[in-house]
Amino acid sequence: DQQVKQNSPSLSVQEGRISILNCDYTNSMFDYFLWYKKYPAEGPTFLISISSIKDKNEDGRFTVFLNKSAKHLSLHIVPSQPGDSAVYFCAASAEDKIIFGKGTRLHILP
Amino acid sequence: ETGVTQSPTHLIKTRGQQVTLRCSSQSGHNTVSWYQQALGQGPQFIFQYYREEENGRGNFPPRFSGLQFPNYSSELNVNALELDDSALYLCASSLEADDYLGANVLTFGAGSRLTVL
């Protein structure tokens, strides 16, 4: 039972363009949604979060949008930079548990 | 401020053996969570410890057990290893406060890669 789904295993984007990573969830009890970024041989690092009562949160080049009726969230990175190449995990929080999606590998092309 | 450190970084065991993985939390953090990340998958929640007690558990059998020590460091123990236990085991620490209603932001270590033959 996959409660957090990232349906795109990989995504390639030209440097300078917008990267959009998508995530769907099934549990309406999630109260926070988070995005983590992972480089090879490192642990995931926290990027940005959004409360379930908001629909947008912005931090520099990163913006997360939440559509509760569709149970969908997305991470926008603009402009995309070479250092953004990594695996991005969508995660959702409920009752002291954080549930992760399978991840999307983002390649930023020169 | 030190981050989360895990040991060992890599280890190889055979089926049926037992393994202990160790984690030192980030300074100031009082909660530790363990995750299993199989190849091509996202981290799967194993359990969480707060004030030295387990306060949340994912869908893992009892042969996965843990400890949290007074200095907030932690161990993950796995008994009767199976081939499917081969994975990257991630430890994450966070600061839990009774009056904090924000997102539970985890700080992860680099992980311990376990191979079971």
Image (tube, helix red, strand yellow):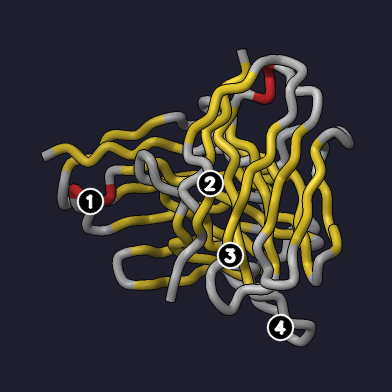
- Disc 1 with disc 2 on a shared chain: no
What is the C-alpha distance between the residues marked 3 and 1?
27 Å
| Quadrant in which residue A29 is drawn | bottom right
Q: Return the mark for residue A74.
A: none
Residue B102 location, x and y as percent?
A: 65, 77
A64, above or below A87, in the image: below
Residue A30 location, x and y as percent?
A: 74, 58
Residue matched to label 2: B7
N-term mark: 3 or 2: 2
Residue matched to label 4: B100
> Label 3 is placed on what type of residue?
Ser
N-term mark: 4 or 2: 2
Compared across the picture, whether A28 is left or right of A40 comes to right
Residue B47 location, x and y as percent?
A: 77, 50
Please identify, in this view, whether the residue under mark 1 or under mark 2 is nearer the observer. 2
What is the C-alpha distance between the residues marked 3 and 4?
20 Å
Residue matched to label 3: B25
- Disc 4 with disc 2 on a shared chain: yes
> Label 1 is placed on what type of residue?
Gly
Compared across the picture, whether A93 is left or right of B2 comes to right
Q: Identify the image quadrant of the C terminus of chain A.
A: top left
Residue matched to label 1: A83
Identify the element where label 2 is drawn.
strand
Residue A107 location, x and y as percent?
A: 27, 37
Q: Mark 2 belongs to which subunit?
A: B
